[in-house]
Image (spheres, rainbow, N blue to C red):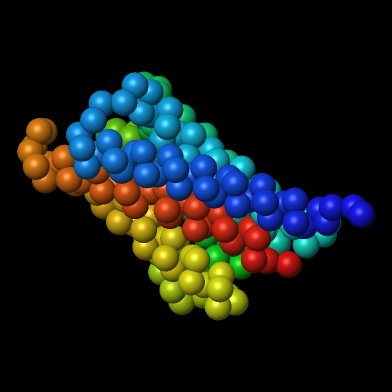
Amino acid sequence: MRNDPSDKRKYISGAVAAAVCALYAAIVATDIFRAQIPFSGVLTLAGVVLCAVYAGVLLPRGRSARAVLPVLFAAVMTAAADVLLLFVPALYAVGVAIFCAAQTIRLSLFSGLSGRRAAILCAAQASLAGVLLLRGVPALYAAGTVYALLLLANLVCAFVCRAPRGIKMLRRTGMALFALCDICVALFNLLPAGTRLQRAAAALMWAFYLPSQLLLAREAGLCT
């Protein structure tokens, strides 16, 4: 008797999700107990990469995969951005720009933008970034401004754009957690170093981040 390929995918996706949850528990535990774990950045990145793997495993086979390829692309680009943000500080602005690309893909998915309209959206982003750069705004802040607008647009679309109920719940919860994570990132960078509030923001950003990525990746398994 042959094994059902769909059952195999179910087991693999379950194992990947369990691994993400285990990494999440380890990361949160280090923040709660203020433990110093070597390669903690690698643990965080591993969780994000596994979320991309999770989306890939859940991706349906055949033509129906087209509808949810953006879910996988956004997850992969998010992981690529995190590589730069965590390990290549000199390319931080590039990492934020890649995050912008991931959010653009997600916005196209949420709002159902056609290829032509998505191209117009990309051109508008490039124009805004160009204007900011010409006015002397540092590249990191220019990319950050575009990213903040895209994040807000995705958060709104997650709540107002039509989608099947299960997918809408994933998008709403995932994007709400994503937004909370980025608010904590902003607070971490704005608050005085070493204060309790800054440490709380640092802990909460990771507490929100991995669950958001796992929920957003889950959409790949709910579309046909």
- In the displayed structure, would residue 43 be above or below residue 25? above
Q: Specify whether 167 is left or right of 132.
A: right
Residue 71 drawn at (x, y percent):
60, 54
- In the displayed structure, would residue 42 be above or below residue 171? above
Query: Is residue 117 among what the camera can see?
Result: no
User: Which quarter of the rendering shows the N terminus?
Assistant: bottom right
Q: Specify whether 66 is left or right of 100.
A: right
- In the displayed structure, would residue 34 be above or below residue 1? above
The residue at 51%/42% (across/down) is 19
Camera-side residue: 156 or 31? 31
Residue 171 drawn at (x, y percent):
49, 65
Residue 116 drawn at (x, y percent):
65, 59
User: Which quarter of the rendering shows the C terminus?
Assistant: bottom right
The residue at 26%/48% (across/down) is 204
The total number of labels drawn is 0
Query: Is residue 171 among what the camera can see?
Result: yes
The residue at 34%/52% (across/down) is 208
Camera-side residue: 137 or 208? 208
The residue at 38%/48% (across/down) is 209
